Image (cartoon, rainbow, N blue to C red):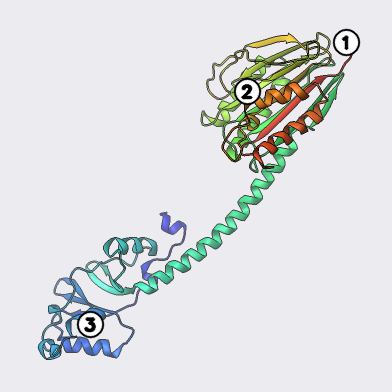
Amino acid sequence: MNTSETHNIPRLAGVMRPVAAIPAQTPVKDVVAIFQGDSSLLMIPVNGLTGFEGVISRRELFSQHLARQYAMELYGKKAISLLMNTHTVVMTPETDVTSALAMLLEYDPDLDTDSFPLLIDGYCVGIVHVAELMMAISKAQAVLLDTLELLSARIREEVDKARRIQQELLPPSAFSHGGLVLDAVLINSTEISGDFYDYFVIDENRLGVMVGDVSGHGVQSGMVATAAKAGLHLLLDQGIKTPGAMLAGMNKAVLATASNALMMTAIVAVVDLAAHTLSLANAGHNYPFLYRAASKQVDMLGESGGFPLGFDAASVYPESHMDFCPGDRLLLYTDGITEARNASGEEFGYERLDAYLREALSGPPAPFRRGLIELVQQFSESERFEDDVTLLVVADETTG
């Protein structure tokens, strides 16, 4: 099935006017009589001994050849082949109307042509008026637009369903486990997000958290993010509890879903209340920030990590281990925050993020998260983000 059949584009056969061809030896005066007998006729095809030879255009015949004084006396009894046009554009009845217009414009960019013949096996079977061709194209486009509108409505409905499903897969934004308090948010830039966050209880003392960001956004990115999340929970069901092993397993899920077409940065961290430790592994993601209550310092955890998920099946993800004491806070985020731009094209950047963290990260997670979102929106002078935005804060609210 070709493209024209797929979209039901009309053929020239549907707008063709059957017109009987005349012999090349027909006298000019007889051709004039034919035109005078049918005011709607714009062109007459001319056949010779071997088939189609040319056309007689009403406009050319009367405005050029016979417009001069005594022209009828000169040409009236002569054969019409003397005045016919042998270089007109010709097409077939099976040509679709859009292809016909393209061919006509190539032959006559100014569209001076008012009609053209249709041939089958070298013989003319009719003519097409250009005005009727344009009307057929207009009607076809109207039908196509109606079809596209129906398809768009269906696509919007399906995308909205996917958006709702994706939102339902996210855990609640607020959570507590033992003395750990967590707050998170995901703000889509389009209906389907390539970002996601998750958290999971390992045992009575350990809580795991993760944030991921698929390259790009939209339906395909959302599918990869969903596959990564499913892979994470499968790993947890299999008893895998360390950040590096979780990322390695998720890497396989992303490769199976995206086939190297998309990659995903991600970071997984596990907080152990009993041991007062934080373990994390990074797959090419933005470096997290850690607020240390004892020293009131904010540090970017820039230890080296592995490649993004979906880059290499053999990737390994080394882990970093550090203290995580009462009052400490961990911030995970995606680059929708740091890469948010203002009207001048300037990015929010890490310096502004670092300044806000030093001012506010020691506070409760929820107000901190809301304040950071509002600060970025004020900077960009817009409530919408160009990219998906995810923030996750976990705090140890136990007393030392």
The residue lying toward the viewer, choosing from 360 and 242, is 360
Q: Is residue 316 left or right of residue 119?
A: right
State the mark number for residue 400: 1
Chain-order first, disc 3 or disc 2:
3
Q: Looking at the image, which residue is at 39% across and 74% down?
A: 132
Q: Is residue 56 above or below residue 281?
A: below
Q: Amino acid at mark 1?
A: Gly
Let me know if residue 140 appears in the view.
yes
Mark 2, secondary structure of its residue: loop
Give the residue at x 45% y 68%. Answer: 138
Observer-nearest of 196 and 239: 196
Q: Which residue position is annotated with label 3?
A: 63
The CA span between labels 3 and 1 is 103 Å
Q: Looking at the rendered structure, which numbered label has been put on residue 286?
A: 2
N-term mark: 3 or 1? 3
Amino acid on which disc 2 is placed: Asn
Would residue 275 appear left or right of 106 to someone viewing this image? right
